[in-house]
Amino acid sequence: MNMISGNIVDVRNRRIFKGEVHFEHDRITQIIPTEKVEDQYILPGFIDAHIHIESSMLVPSEFARLAVVHGTVATVSDPHEIGNVLGVKGVEYMIADGKKVNFKFAFGAPSCVPATTFETAGAEITPKEVEYLLKKPEIKYLAEMMNWPGVLFNDQTVYEKLNIAKALNKPIDGHAPGLRGEQAEAYVKAGISTDHECFTADEARDKLKHGMKIAIREGSAAKNFEALVELFSEAPEMLMFCSDDKHPDNLVEGHIDELVRRTLKRGYELFDVLQAACITPIDHYNLDVGALQEGDYADFIIVDDLERFKVQATYINGIQVAKTNQSMIEVQQSEVVNQFNCDPINVDTIKVKVNASNIKVIEALDGQLITNCIIEQAATDEHGYLQSDTSKDVLKMVVVNRYKNAAPALAFIKNFKLKEGAIASSVGHDSHNIIAVGVNDKSICKAINLIIKEKGGVSAVSNSDEAILPLPVAGIMSNDDGYKIAENYTAIDKMTKTMGSTLNSPFMTLSFMGLLVIPNLKLSDLGLFDGKMFKFTSLSED
Amino acid sequence: MNMISGNIVDVRNRRIFKGEVHFEHDRITQIIPTEKVEDQYILPGFIDAHIHIESSMLVPSEFARLAVVHGTVATVSDPHEIGNVLGVKGVEYMIADGKKVNFKFAFGAPSCVPATTFETAGAEITPKEVEYLLKKPEIKYLAEMMNWPGVLFNDQTVYEKLNIAKALNKPIDGHAPGLRGEQAEAYVKAGISTDHECFTADEARDKLKHGMKIAIREGSAAKNFEALVELFSEAPEMLMFCSDDKHPDNLVEGHIDELVRRTLKRGYELFDVLQAACITPIDHYNLDVGALQEGDYADFIIVDDLERFKVQATYINGIQVAKTNQSMIEVQQSEVVNQFNCDPINVDTIKVKVNASNIKVIEALDGQLITNCIIEQAATDEHGYLQSDTSKDVLKMVVVNRYKNAAPALAFIKNFKLKEGAIASSVGHDSHNIIAVGVNDKSICKAINLIIKEKGGVSAVSNSDEAILPLPVAGIMSNDDGYKIAENYTAIDKMTKTMGSTLNSPFMTLSFMGLLVIPNLKLSDLGLFDGKMFKFTSLSED
């Protein structure tokens, strides 16, 4: 029997009182009001309502080790990235690795693997496999249904998956950026009950009106907090917080605790904010997470006060997993699973000529997944091959199929602003092929081959140096110490900026340049893709 | 670490193989195929997909003690009866009492308390309280939505409850006897996903067509097995088994194991039958019950062979809870909660005169909840008061409000065939007031007062004897040894038959004579009720 006393923040009943929390094994046995208590606040733990753990570049056990320091006790996690690499086996890897530590992962069954038929992924997750996954007690929901046109236009496979989730009474997550009005209504009526993709409050209101819950997203990639926080004055009971993607360096700095602090600073009501951060995800996803009530799992955190919200301790299943600034979870031995079957490439494979003086160029936009398609004059070498032109900042981009040997796909891109060398990554949404950008073919090949040698990672090659952060697990995660990975990621990011890039996060931007479902011009391993027309297009101006 | 070997019936993967089940604490750690095994069959435990535990007259802990002997490891249970007596407090009593033993109760939030406004119940369960209950992890679903007209005609309170369940992603149970065609479709589209009230296979087909799951019901009261078992050749994956109501004497004899045996005898496929008995309820209600897979809760049973299906052992959470014909669960100390606030009555309060020579008489039908309204000549005493007439088998029936002192309600009823004395019960659906029938006022009062003295029970008064089975918990359950209760119930049932009743189960029939939602003529504490017109009616012929 253990006991901790303090000011108990009982979010479910919207009250604060002095008391003792008694717990035994993994459960809270009693909560007893009493006057003499420690000068601290006890509250339910924080929950990230939508995060792809893979984006942290850490395996689940290691993600948990870093997250608990910020008072996070649970995540609702779509293993979509590893699903694209390894299918069901990848999802099962995430479940098994997560179980190594005392943390509450609620995984979803990926609904859209592969993301499109215009790229080569490592696996497919069929409706039958979705059913197999959803029947597992560890799988709590059907993960984000990104194929919203399929929902609106009655795609049979989409509905097969939706109906399986309904028959098993597991919630269905949405992903419908920008969907409004009748389309939003039809999407909700198909049984989809959350969205984390709203970028304006008005869009969120359209979805809230039909009973959808909205996860306010603020992660390493998309940042919607500023646009959506005002919803706390309208429908606080329908909100949750999420990060979607959280890079290792950002995870070291903070998590849902940061969003709680920021929301409270705006003057929103304490219990409304904690309801979103701690309770609504439990109720929506039926998580096996405690809400600081008698009989609940002993999952709670201790903070110094209700302004700074500094996490002093995190408890999960009655066991302390973090103290101030320090994780008490041990680094685990995580095995390596992967699918990475391509040989090193040479410069001859990434040469290209066109019969045109102008070419289509991808214009990357800092901090955005969307790109523009612009036209630039083609720069060629003495043999007529297209080449990078640093004076105009038009650089060559290459995508290499990592699942088998195949001819690389080529394009040109603006705004990476590298003045030397190249960078490459095997984190490339959604198929996670190798994607690279550079000022010359030799550097590009070198950066790509560094990754091929390690079977996954992010790499940078400058005039004087080369660096790689290996990601051996599925080519997208490391099984090493998370704090070390965060440091190394910071270092290679800095190196890229020294090479000239002015992007806020060059590797992140790079990883979305192959994400075909977001327009306008993207590059998959199969070629240049027009995301507006949803078809392949040619490099030369039409 | 524990190990049991045998022929493993892996229902999820539809295969049987020789192997060892290894388990530690509450989980199965490994299942290892091996050749040398015990000559026995290991399979997942049985689940009753819909049962009101209160119908067993036992508190949950004691119900569990009897049920595990038949290989039952879990029930999906609507605490509707105690809800009508004690509201939320009653539901919480069931949860707390169930937790005393190693058994998996999945309770629902009662959706229809009180059942109608034409009777006096002990409590109401408001939408706010439904929400409070559904947020508990122990509450797995919104229990049977009996108000199907409210669903079809957009009753606001009904939809408030349905929407709460949907927002919390908890399944909604149906109850729509006889609903067909478009009405069935509209009922399903409101989000209601099961029905256990079908009495023909065609009716079930109508509901299956729209994605509903059907629980085949065979209990002490309603018996639909014969009518529905053929569905196993059409939609086995959509079926479950349930008893709905199970009296103590019947529970001693068998449970879901009986239905498994009966279905197999008809030649239906083993895995289809076990899917319905063991697996589909887990998947539909997201139960915390194991399905005999690695990582699952160690919930399983051992049987001698796959024909007789004799249960030799039941394991729950890795602990053996039953061996052949013997429960290993101890009798618990269960506290008494109740709401029983009426004083003894005297014969003057149950006298009635009418200005008519003919009166409406309830015709009870053996084994059915439905009654007929027939007309009989009124028999009167020398003062003109209506009285029972054993020669025509028209007996006086009385309902007494047990929640406060109030004038009793009176009616006359055919088919109980008592030749002497009276019987009474405080189990009276759905409000559980006291209901009695007898050949003279003195006996009727005596039978009622026996129950009032004990604050609940079933009683019988003959010319020479009187007997009561006390039910002190909410006036509908005993906290005593279940086997003793079964014996005493058998004894008082036999006594009633000695007194002349030819009904199969007189106390059961009696308990449904106040169930207003099933037509045609019923009696509540507030008066005689015409279930077809859904309004009160007079005793004299119109």
Image: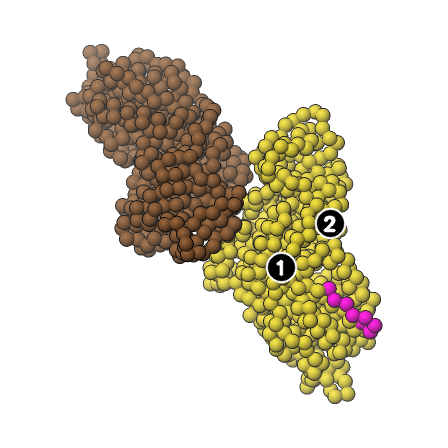
Chain colours: A yellow, B brown
Residue B102 image position (x, y, % from top left):
47, 37
Residue B535 image position (x, y, % from top left):
34, 30
Give yes or no for residue A95 being in the magenta stretch: no
Specify the segment rendered in magenta.
A462-469
Residue placed at 46% from the left, 23% from the top?
B336
Disc 1 designates what residue?
A: A335
Q: Chain of mark 2?
A: A
Mark 1 burial class by Cα count in 10 Å: few <14, some 14-19, many 20+: few
Left or right placement of residue B238 versus residue A18 in this view: left
Residue placed at 71% from the left, 55% from the top?
A482
Q: Nearer the viewer, mark 1 or mark 2?
A: 1
Real-space Cα separation, disc 1 to disc 2, in angstroms: 27 Å
Quadrant of res A415 = bottom right
Which disc is residue B188 wearing? none
Residue at far bottom of view:
A383
Q: Is residue A248 above or below residue B429?
A: below
Does the image show residue A69?
Answer: yes
Q: Quadrant of the C terminus of chain B?
A: top left
